[in-house]
Amino acid sequence: MWWSWTASGEAPVSVTTAGSDFDTLLGIYAGSAESFAGLRVVAANDDVSPSDLTSQVIFQPETRTTYYIAIDGYGSATGNVRLELRPASAAVLAIRLKKPDLVSLLISNTSARPMILQASPDLANWTPFSTNLIQNGPTEWTSSVDRGQLHRFFRAVPAD
Ligand SMILES: [Ca+2]
């Protein structure tokens, strides 16, 4: 199933299939809708967590760009879809691959609390990526990608 949505601004948005009654796959695409080959993946997710098989992505749109939202069933699973698109709140991390070996991390802190950015190789052990406090508003970092590293996760957490 496909939906289209045109961004009116650049505020990060959250797209979720929470509440759907089957194992969803979620993909956000942009580009020419005339053919599937003309589309590029903006963001995609299978499972929110090992125990939550619905999907969620957070991405930062470009103004007046149309995005195509695809929902599919994992392994041809079918069911009732619930799709929610809303402004992402609090701290939002948008990650973009700028080059094959460089990612851009854009943090939009919409809360009044300062945040810090942490990185993890395994979602279990977190270390500060930067000790700089992220104040209200957008902040951007870049991080080089170690090709020997399979995964690297980032999160923004309140500093206190
Ligand atoms: Ca899933």
Image: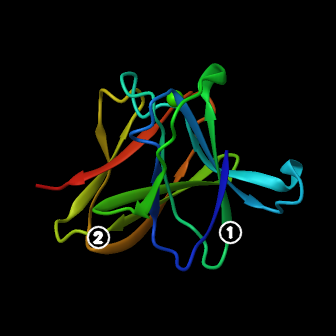
Q: SS for tag 2?
A: loop
**Circles 2, 1 touching at the beta carbon (< 8 Å):** no
Furthest toward the left, the residue is 160
Q: Quadrant of residue 134?
A: bottom left
Alpha carbons under labels 2 and 1: distance apart: 24 Å
Q: Position of residue 35 (x, y in %)?
A: 89, 53
Tell whether 137 sits left or right of 72. Answer: left
Tell whether 114 sits left or right of 95. Answer: left
Q: Considering the image in quadrants, where does the N terminus appear?
A: top right
Q: Residue at x 17, y 71 (%)?
A: 112
Image: 53 above or below 130: above
Q: Quadrant of residue 107?
A: bottom left
As shown in the figure, which amino acid type bears the numbered disc 1? Thr
Q: Which residue is nearer to you in this view: 98 or 74? A: 74
Q: Residue at x 51, y 36 (%)?
A: 80
Reading the image, the residue beneath label 1 is 66
Q: Which residue is nearer to you in this view: 132 or 134? A: 134
Image: 26 above or below 157: above
As shown in the figure, which amino acid type bears the numbered disc 2? Thr
Q: Position of residue 15 (x, y in %)?
A: 48, 53
Reading the image, the residue beneath label 2 is 110
Circle on res. 6: none
- The type of colouring in the image is rainbow
Tell whether 48 sits left or right of 149. Answer: left
Q: Position of residue 121 (x, y in %)?
A: 42, 30
